[in-house]
Amino acid sequence: MFLQDVFSQYWGVAISSFLLGLLLVLVALKVFPRLGLMDRPHWYGLLRKSIPYYGGIVIFLAFVVLVLLFVPLTKTLIGLLVGGGMIFILGFLDDLLGLNPFLRLGVQFLASVVLVVFGVGILSINLPFIGVLDFSEPVIFGIMVASAIFTILWVMAILNTMNFVDGVSGLTSGIGFIAGVTLFILSVHPGVHADPSSQVGVATISLILAMVSLSFFIFDFPKPRILMGDGGSTFLGFVIATLAIFSGGKVATAFLVLGIPILDMIWVVLRRVFGGQKFWKGDLRHLHHRLLDLGFSERKVVVLYLIVTAFFGFAAVSFVSSQQKFFILIGLVVLMLLLASALVLIPNKK
């Protein structure tokens, strides 16, 4: 009965989101080459032909149109759209021109502040065996300072995590699909919310995110015909981070779903800092790059990543208490440590 109700309520959103995303990708494949919106493989020593780039345009347009069509406009939704628009434009310009990293961080900070101003914030976190951490105090000039700081750090971390993982075609769009589906299921899950009807907006946005990501994934994997660029990856990260905040209780879930990319980002940044390198300067030492060095094909790397992501997404949906998620998180950290050790000890195949 529950599944029947969910299907009857959301099937139109799911199909519309998938078809619009599909249509816009097909249009982009025809139009982008004429506009010169192509990637530059020779910059990275690749021998393949150029393919359409800036696919984030498709993701952003489809998402905004669908949200305005299916979701009532509220203050927090305006904050999501305004902040998300800032992130998309920033990523697009960075893809096009190559912006200063401090300018990127500055605009990301401002976009996160926009969310706070429009009423989006993390008010508390329930830590197993410790209790609830309350971020509602102190309040200065009407702003909950602790909540604002934590929210800004969370959003910036997640959007950069999605950008970091965008090193192999199919990873970001695949993770976007899994994250969207997970957040959707938790939003309609009767065991999570006493009143699931209050989560209709969050569920709808999550489903739109998932289906638009899926429509892009079809052309992004296994052989890419279009690339999303920073405009797409950072926008997806911004939306996922915000959805995890909207209704509360999903921050831990988002952390689990993005656990491998988040831990990989932390590892890479710490290695760069302690190695005397600039933490914002890209390299080929991410987990997916190390797997490629060991002889994995790009297809196998994407499949492995998505299987692990889907597993932890399924665990987050199946085990909803904070203590259960804590033990799953411990397992995730152990898995990441084992992977890191193996990648350090096993010699490169290439």
Image (cartoon, rainbow, N blue to C red):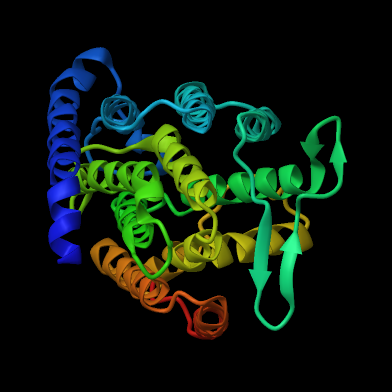
Number of marks in the rendered image: 0
> Residue 322 at x, y = what percent?
56, 76
Picture residue at 25% right of the left edge, 13% below the top:
35
Among the 4 quarters of the image, the one containing residue 92: top left
Would you say 298 lies left or right of 98 here? Answer: left
The spot of residue 61 in percent (x, y) is: 31, 25
What residue do we see at 12% from left, 50% from top? 8
Q: Quadrant of the C terminus?
A: bottom left
Residue ID at (37%, 66%): 292
Instruction: Check the image and report above or below for 119 versus 334.
Output: above
Report the side of 336 relative to 315 (left or right): right
Question: Do we see residue 275 in this rendering?
Answer: no
- Furthest-front residue in view? 195
Q: Is residue 42 above or below residue 188?
A: above
On-image quarter of the N terminus: bottom left
User: Looking at this view, is 280 or 344 the one in front?
Assistant: 280
Q: From this viewpoint, is residue 134 visible?
A: yes
Quadrant of res 28: top left
Give the residue at the far top of this rendering: 35
- Describe residue 225's horizontal placement relative to residue 123 as left or right: left
**Spot occupied by residue 342 in the image (x, y as percentages of width and height):** 50, 85
Name the spot of residue 280 as percent of width and height, x first. Answer: 65, 45
Q: Residue at x 39, y 45 (%)?
A: 202
